[in-house]
Amino acid sequence: MNNKFYNIYNEFAKTIEEGSLKPNTKLPSEKELTEKYNVSRETVRKALNLLSQNGYIQKIKGKGSFVLDVAKFDFPVTGIVSFKEISQKLGKKSNTIVEELELITPNAFLQTQMDAGENDNVWKVVRVREIGNERIILDKDFFLESCVPNLTKDICENSIYEYIENELFINISFDKKVISVEKATNEDKKYLDLGDDTVVVVVKNYVSLNDTTVFQYTESRHKIDKFKFIHFARRN
Amino acid sequence: MNNKFYNIYNEFAKTIEEGSLKPNTKLPSEKELTEKYNVSRETVRKALNLLSQNGYIQKIKGKGSFVLDVAKFDFPVTGIVSFKEISQKLGKKSNTIVEELELITPNAFLQTQMDAGENDNVWKVVRVREIGNERIILDKDFFLESCVPNLTKDICENSIYEYIENELFINISFDKKVISVEKATNEDKKYLDLGDDTVVVVVKNYVSLNDTTVFQYTESRHKIDKFKFIHFARRN
DNA sequence: CAGTGGTCTAGACCACGGT
DNA sequence: CCGTGGTCTAGACCACTGA
């Protein structure tokens, strides 16, 4: 992105994440920022509102903008985050094992979950996520072949998102996640180190493009003791 | 709120939720909306961006704004939603049982979870949520007495949020939720209809004011088969 | 090409906080 | 009172869409 407001947002987001800007620090006023960056006030405000929305700062009318304690928000809050991004942030050794990779004809269930008809082929990818030698997550991904024509084991072992965004230049627009707890299936028991667990956390993820077609459906099945979901939300 | 952009937002949000504006309908162009509402384009855009952010519409450059299928997003997505609001939307008979209501001195754990020192008193409220005669959720709420001086059984049986916002005029600014699965405690087994369940879903909620103080900490402990969390997020 | 949304500007008025 | 952020305006230029 080559937007002025986005560059300003990024500069502050980075310095706050690094910790160079300490919590409770007061940012320069909007007027001062317009002068520093040579932009209009509305542009400054776009950047600050983004920071506020994403939990980086708190704006207080009549007082100013103050840095929030991002350390409290362990993960990046809000948005789609790939497994690779997460494990990098955690700093733990992680591993992805591709168990299945094939083109299939979508069954009735899949046709209701994503925008696929009988005649659309769908990539099915089954992967196991290991962190520190423990098999923790079972990811079952389904992609429309019409959007993602080629998939290789190599791509699946790395970040499929990186491939989709940086190689195919597909613009992901939004996603919907549904989190619930379900009985562990035989597949879960086969692929995961469940021990005595009888249930898993299931995250169903519907990923949509600009034209609102659901081009990806993913079921992430998590070992319960390793699952954690964090959610930051502004009120208004 | 008496903002122009907020009124426009609300008008569309309502008609979309009702279904009077069908999915895939094209909204009037931004130019047309400026004329219809007699406002500037940036004001129209503020309203439309809010609608987009909250999953009501999809904006496509060069084409226009289109109504999304809100029915897919069961609950109101993003934000703090009280139990009362949820059960109303579900249309099921619900009941709240206040099991405990007392002023306590916060222990070490509570002091780390919210902005309470040894000398601050804290309201402890323990409530059980029943939907259709099944005890499903155990809510343990803690409020700073300095923010919420009075709490009665009556208030707790209804919506504490309604009381806080409409009676005390406290401005909630943001919240952080942490969702995980934990072993059921004896308290869980005592208050909930767990059957053979050995675990519960725990939602820890940290609620902050404008000045960023965490004035409320809540632990919602859910029966696993009735738990569902939905999350809509834009990408950008 | 005309119409659309995305970004940006310069300036205005308001409501709030603290002095 | 001044400085702060919140709202709003009128107008500009750009990039994308579809005829």
Image: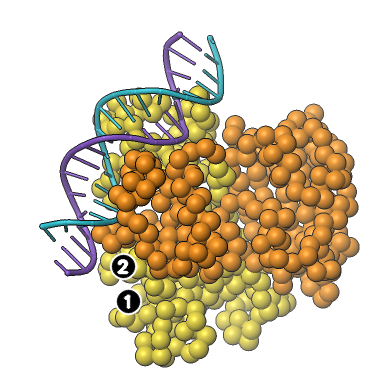
Chain colours: A orange, B yellow, C purple, D cyan
Q: How many marks?
A: 2
Task: Name the foreground residue: B226 vs A167.
Answer: A167
Left or right of A30: which side holds B115? Answer: right
Give me the chain letter of mark 1. B
What residue appears at the point 79 percent right and 62 percent down from the top-left corner?
Answer: A94
Which amino acid, by three-letter code, is at mark 2?
Ile
Residue type at tag 1 = Cys
Residue A67 location, x and y as percent?
43, 63
Residue B71 occupies which quadrant of the picture?
top right
Marks 2 and 1 on same chain: yes
Instruction: Give the image quarter of residue B234.
Output: top right
Q: Residue at x 48, y 44 (%)?
A: A6
Q: Is residue B119 above or below residue B63?
A: below
> Could you classify mark 2 by the number of other residues whose Cα lies within 10 Å: few (under 14), some (14-19), or many (20 or more)?
some
A208 vs A231, left or right, is right
Question: Residue A105: in sight, yes or no?
Answer: yes
Q: Which residue is mark 2?
A: B170
The image shows residue D2 at horizontal and vertical percentages of: 16, 56
Element on which disc 2 rests: loop
Residue located beneath label 1 in the image: B147
Marked residue chain, label 2: B
Q: Secondary structure at mark 1?
A: loop
